[in-house]
Amino acid sequence: MVFTFDDLPLVFSCPRHWQADPAVDMIMQTWRMRERMKTVSVALVICLNVGVDPPDVTKTQPCARQECWVDPLSLNPQRALETIGGNLQRQYERWQPRARYRQSLDPTVEEVRRLATGLRRSAREERVLFHYNGHGVPRPTANGEIWVFNRSYTQYIPLSIYDLQSWMGSPSIYVYDCNNAGIIVDSFKNFAEQHEREYVEQVRAGGPQAGAAELPPPPSLRNCIQLAACSKDQLLPMNPDLPADLFTACLTTPIKVALRWFVMKNDLGHLAPQVKLEHLEKIPGQFGDRRTMLGELNWIFTAITDTIAWNTLPRDTFQKLFRQDLLVASLFRNFLLAERIMKSNDCTPVSQPKLPPTHQHPMWEAWDLAVDICLSQLKSILGE
């Protein structure tokens, strides 16, 4: 017996299913952003003063030393600083190779001002990133100041976030890798509101004086994104098996950090037997080639962090952070990893816009499984 489609019962065939209901307004939604933005300039401000520890933090012995996967004490101070700056730039270039990068190594206030204003001028209406490594200077102050140096490196000089906002303008993204970094996030909001109040007062007073340039708009907090390594009352981890710039490493080299943390967390190979930390440097492949082990891990990591973000963030926030700007999307995916790893070391990264906690999301178990499967095959692959 032969059946045709005409013999099959039809569903949704009542008159009400065929009639258009004028009361129903269909709203089409898309996951793609109409307004795209690009981070076109990156300022890398590194304050290390290699060989001289800041006076307000007593470090453990041994303690974390590596900066951008380089031990600064293994080279002379100037060479170490230049190597760290070059490595940090290459780590960022993997996520945004076409941006304009400028390094400022152990700078003065004037050097930071020239750097920030120059990058804002060239970026026009696009986004500028400001990365601050403050491991060689004191903690941020309660008055909203970070620290740089004088020309002879004999004094620490405060740099107000209020001034930095004026130089950077908006839209901007800031990354703070230093102790008590949450202080900067709180101060940033207060100073942004102060800028807006002053702008309104100047407009009410009649604008700029005769012959002066047009008043620039104040930095909009809504267009400024911040990522901070820890809250305002926390110090950075000092575990000697982890890099000193653990937060930066999570943001810029997430797979390397995730694998290292996984092996350490699981008692140096409890789940992946006979895998040691030194074996992780030999994992074959390229991040952009999914046919290789590193490429597949990178693809899985991107899928899992995107899924976590999609399931935990409001739609508008997800679209802004994960679909508008390629570099911002990469940094926030990696920020989810940073939260997980930093939390395990008694640090709570801070972001603006603020994200809900994701460090215990069940999708991380899928990532752990993928890493375990990968590492369980590593020894046989290396032996071939």
Image (cartoon, rainbow, N blue to C red):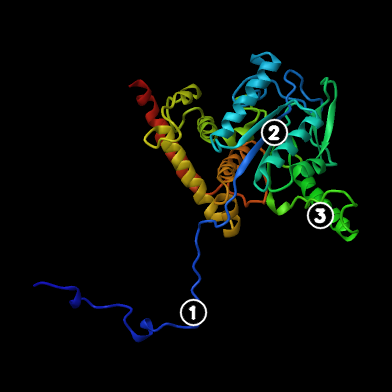
Q: Quadrant of the N terminus?
A: bottom left
Q: What residue type is labelled 3?
A: Glu
- Point 55% across, 42% down: residue: 330
Residue that numbered label 3 is attached to: 196
Label 3 CA crowd tier, 10 Å (few <14, some 14–19, many 20+) = some
| Earlier sequence position, callout 1 versus callout 2 | 1
- Point 61% across, 43% down: residue: 39
In front: mark 3 or mark 2?
3
**Which is more toward the observer, 136 or 233?**
136
- In this rendering, position of residue 51 left or right of residue 197: left
Q: In which quarter of the image is residue 341?
A: top right
- Point 36% across, 82% down: residue: 18
**Which is more toward the observer, 112 or 87?**
112
| Earlier sequence position, callout 3 versus callout 2 | 3
In front: mark 1 or mark 3?
3
- In this rendering, position of residue 62 left or right of residue 191: left
- Residue 236: which numbered mark, if any? 2
Q: Residue furthest front?
A: 211
- In this rendering, position of residue 315 left or right of residue 271: right
Q: Where is residue 383 in the image (x, y as percent from the top left)?
A: 35, 21
In front: mark 1 or mark 2?
1
Estimate the spatial distance between the alpha carbons at disc 3 and disc 2, rounded to whole Å: 33 Å
Residue that numbered label 1 is attached to: 24
Q: What residue type is labelled 1?
A: Val
Q: Where is residue 81 in the image (x, y as percent from the top left)?
A: 68, 21
Q: What residue type is labelled 2?
A: Leu
Q: Where is residue 24 in the image (x, y as percent from the top left)?
A: 49, 79
Compared to residue 183, the image places residue 136 above or below, namely above
Circle 2: element type: loop
